[in-house]
Image: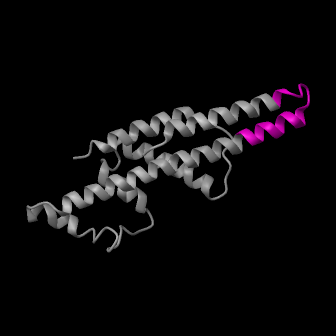
Amino acid sequence: MIHFRAIWNAHAVTDGHFREFADEEPGDAEWANTWANLRQFNANAYFVLLWSQAEVEINQLCDELIQRKRNDSDWDSQRAWDLIGEHGPTGRKLRGPRDLMDRIALLCKKGGRVYNRLSELYRLRSRIAHGEILQSGLDTAEIAAELEALIKELKATP
C-alpha cells in the first residue's frame, strides 16, 4: 500500500506549524531563520519518506513482473527472464550499483519520460540520503502527486 497522500498530509500539518512558530516573533531574523531551516529539514525528510514508498512499490511491481515472465509457458519468452537469476525468498535478487534503476528499466522504457523523471527523483533522494540538505525545490504535494502518477504508469507494464 502506498501512503503518498497521508505522508503529504502529515508534511502539510507539520510545515503549517513551523510557519506559525516562525511568525510568532515578527522582526526576529534569527528566530525566522531557525524555523525556515527546520522547514527545509522537514521537507527533505518527507521527500525521502515519499521516495521510500515509491521504492517499495517499484520493487513489488518488478518482483511480480519477473515472476510472471519467468513462469511464461513459452520458453522463448521465458529464457531471457531466467538470465536475471532466481528471485524470491530462496533466490537472489538483481544485483549491481544501479539496482533500483535496473528494476525501473524493467518496468518502463529506459531513457523514456517515466524512467528519466524517476531517475531525477532518485538522484535527489540519494543526495539527501547521503547528507546534503536541499534548500529549495521540494514541493511535497507536487512530488507526492507526481510519484503517485508515475507508479500508476509503471503498473500498466504488461
Picture layout, residue 57 above or below residue 8: below
Taking the view exactly as shown, the residue that stands out farthest to the right is: 28
Query: In this picture, which residue range is highlighted in magenta?
Result: 22-39
- Looking at this view, is 127 or 78 the one in front? 78
Residue 137 seen in this snapshot:
no
Q: Residue 44: x and y, percent?
A: 64, 45
Dividing the picture into quadrants, the one containing residue 84 is bottom left
Q: Residue 92: x and y, percent?
A: 34, 73
Q: Does 26 lie within the magenta span? A: yes
Q: Residue 38: x and y, percent?
A: 75, 42
Across the whole image, how many numbered discs are drawn on residues?
Answer: 0
Q: Residue at x 28, y 56 (%)?
A: 64
Going by the image, does 25 lie left or right of 105?
A: right
Going by the image, does 85 lie left or right of 114?
A: left
Q: Residue at x 40, y 56 (%)?
A: 101
Dividing the picture into quadrants, the one containing residue 91 is bottom left
Q: Residue 13: x and y, percent?
A: 66, 33
- Looking at this view, is 10 or 98 the one in front? 10
Of helix, strand and loop, which mostly describes the magenta segment? helix
Q: Residue at x 49, y 42 (%)?
A: 3
Q: Does 122 lie within the magenta span? A: no
Q: Residue at x 91, y 26 (%)?
A: 27
